[in-house]
Amino acid sequence: MNKLPIDFKIISTGSQGNAVVIHKVILIDCGVPFKALKEYYKNLRLVLLTHIHSDHFNKTTIKKLAAERPTLRFGCGRWLVGPLVECGVSKSQIDVLNFDTSYGYGICNVIPVPLVHNVPNQGYKIHFPFGKMIYATDTNNLNGITAWHYDLYMIEANYEDDVIQEKIKLKKAEGLYAYEQQVLKNHLSKAKCDDFIFKNCGPNSRYCYLHCHDDTKD
């Protein structure tokens, strides 16, 4: 599946941590230990961050990354400026990226898109001269977002609707708290993911499911 035009490496995805490297120079999310980035951090030119949750924003790793790469650029929503500064990132290195606005980085154009989570969050469309991709995780829906005939879709497919509804039903019957109800509010189902992909994809598009739920960790 991972063939040109857009090269990617999933370092980690899911509740244990999230980090994806695109074309060896762009890091999307930084929710992993620094040692997971040792093979990649020296080549990075841009870090795109989505939201404050620790599986996407590892403060210790960001602090180390800022120290090792003092000229590295960080793109994010305004809600992450304060946390980045606290991690030792200079304000001069931080680009505040507004929704649905295109920002040129030479290697690509970046367009943030709003996502629906329990904290401020955004995904990213990334346009290279040779292809287009979209990255979106930790969202209830993708309403109002289009990515027509993109080359790569990296989209959350967190749960199967029938499976999670059955879990909620069983837990309620036992008088237990069903955390899955929060999952329904804050994460994207595989059905919604598939619907978005197949409404937008072209004949040569590829897709990669992200942030899939692992039943073995219940």
Image: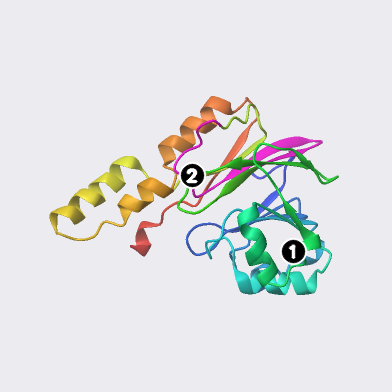
Q: Which amino acid does the dot numbered 2 rest on?
A: Val
Distance (Cα) linking label 1 and label 2: 30 Å
Residue 30: in magenta span = no
The residue located at (42%, 49%) in the rendering is 186
* Image quadrant where residue 91 sits: bottom right
Q: Which residues are magenta?
A: 125-144
The residue located at (31%, 50%) in the rendering is 181
Specify whether residue 36 is in view.
yes
The residue located at (61%, 36%) in the rendering is 206
In the rendered image, residue 203, in percent from the top left (x then y), is placed at 63, 25
Residue that carries the numbered disc 1 in the rendered image:
40
Residue that carries the numbered disc 2 in the rendered image:
116
Q: Residues within 10 Å of mark 1 (few under 14, many from 20)?
A: some
Label 2 residue SS: loop
- Label 1 with label 2: CB-CB less than 8 Å: no
In the rendered image, residue 69, in percent from the top left (x then y), is placed at 80, 69
Residue 138: in magenta span = yes
The residue located at (80%, 57%) in the rendering is 45
Q: Residues within 10 Å of mark 2 (few under 14, many from 20)?
A: some
